[in-house]
Amino acid sequence: MRVALIAPPYPLEEGLSAPLGICYAAAAFERANAEVIILDYMVRKYSPGKLIAELSEFKPDFIGATSVTLNFGVAASIVETAKKAFPSAITAMGGPHVSFDYDYTLKRYPGIDLIVVGEGEQTIAELVPAMHNRSAWQGINGLAFKENGKVVATPARELIKDLDSLPLPSRHLLQMSRYLAVGFALSIITSRGCPNGCIFCQGHRMVGHKIRSRNPKQVVDEIESLLAVGHERVNFSDDFFTSNRKRVKAICEEIQRRGLSFGWTAFSRADSVNREILKIMKDAGCDTIFYGMESGNQEILDRIKKRVTLDRIRKAVEDAKAVGMAVFGSFIVGLPGETKETMMDSHRFATELDIIHGYHFLAPFPGTEVKENIHEYDLELLTDDWAMFDANRPIVRTSGVNPEDLETFVDKYFLQPARQQEAQIEIRYQEGTLTPMEEMAYFGNKKLNIVYRILIEDLIETHGRIPFPKTNTATSMLLAEKLLPYIDTNFEFMLKSVEHLVEKGYLKHTIEDDHHVWRWA
């Protein structure tokens, strides 16, 4: 069986990391003896023609895609395009959005044959031998599909008890040099599950309330394999990494026992850490911890079932700073009961904590309590267009604030200060007064955007073949000159970005027929 899995386009500003879920799905298909490819449009240009050409070369029996809510529309459209071009192939989608919205998805998009609901690895193992026997689908838990025009959902699949029984994600099917070029941390999981019941989160329903953990040695085996091929940073993307301090300590001790040196980040809850465990994490390489703070108003926190106090958050921040960690706090505006005053409470709280922080607008995703029971809360949902559910624009109102109030607050207390800071950095760069660390960060931001445009516009593929020059010009300079017209930047930044990609080995150079030819490694 030939399986083509698709990673749909995803915005850079949301944090671009190699798609973990689809790599786990690919590993499950490979274990079932399928031949698998991943068409990764997160770091390559997407077009319908390109999709059809790549699928035509592979000739798939099965075409699947994953998505979250914000890129669901484009993912579903891609699957529909594939189905029209390859009507005999079985088409499917999986992931958190469709797991909670399979009825609408199957009715709205007839080109999607089935939905894999919830955790997919064991469902895939049963589905592969029965793929083209539709009558057998009803005997496979964790599926939804249409039968005689009606949506059929089989019983929910039991969550996987032993995560160590799963094969490691099939990252070898990705062109990892592209993700290395972007420079974001590579995500791995050490557990699945979250015991908390925050009303805005899908996590506890998607992967269960009970924490299921991987063996610390297996986790560090995976990390070691990633470091061996050039990755320098890891993000533990568990819903709740610090749920069990004993397990966290075991992972950290295994990292140190092997002498591994790398930077890493983790998502945590303020009420799950103390100074001792944070010190252990810091000593093992954790330099940044993410706390979901959500609001600086205690009544709001109680209403969204956060089950944490402002004082406990203060202590968690204090402890992280004391051991030398950076703290990032995530806030949400537009939560039930939000008013102009409660938003100011969040601003005052973030200012008091003196941490890196950001704001998102509430997006009531499918599967969340706030979406399914929205009329029980002080909320009105203003759109059903999933493309608007990116948490970067207001799509709800409360009795105390409207969308304009939400936008005004975020612009005044977050976006404007960020723009002013960027402007000051630009002025100081022109004056030559940036510190070495500031200059490194400044060029890092420039490089990130340049490299992303090179990737997402397929500029190496389309412009990476360059005739020999008449002068003795460095090959990297030739490439920078060739790419410059296609990106809004200056030559200095372009050259530095290209030189970085070459020095790191992400771009490879060969000579063919009196041409310099560049390719991604």
Image (cartoon, rainbow, N blue to C red):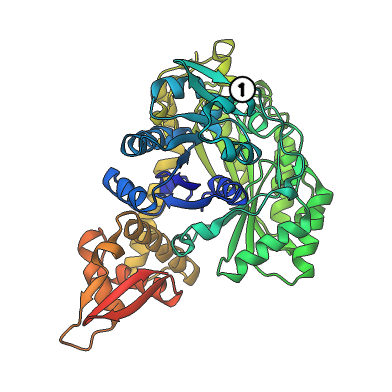
Q: Quadrant of the C terminus?
A: bottom left
In this orientation, which residue lies closer to the viewer: 246 or 435?
A: 246
Q: Position of residue 392 (x, y in %)?
A: 43, 35
Residue at 50% over, 13% down: 399
Number of numbered callouts drawn = 1
Residue 337 seen in this snapshot:
no
- Kind of residue at disc 1: Thr
Would you say 47 lies left or right of 111 here? left
In this orientation, which residue lies closer to the viewer: 15 or 97?
A: 97
Residue at 52% over, 30% down: 115
Q: Which residue is mark 1?
A: 154
In this orientation, which residue lies closer to the viewer: 61 or 156?
A: 61
Q: Which of the 4 image quadrants contains residue 509?
A: bottom left
Q: Position of residue 486 (x, y in %)?
A: 22, 60
Give the farthest residue toward the right: 246
Secondary structure beneath label 1: loop
Residue 20 seen in this snapshot:
yes
Mark 1 residue crowding within 10 angstroms, few (<14) / some (14–19) / many (20+)? some
In this orientation, which residue lies closer to the viewer: 328 or 118?
A: 118
Would you say 67 lies left or right of 9 here? right
Position above or below: 333 against 355: above
Residue at 39% over, 25% down: 109
Q: Which of the 4 image quadrants contains residue 336?
A: top right
Would you say 275 lies left or right of 47 here? right
Q: Position of residue 371 (x, y in %)?
A: 54, 20
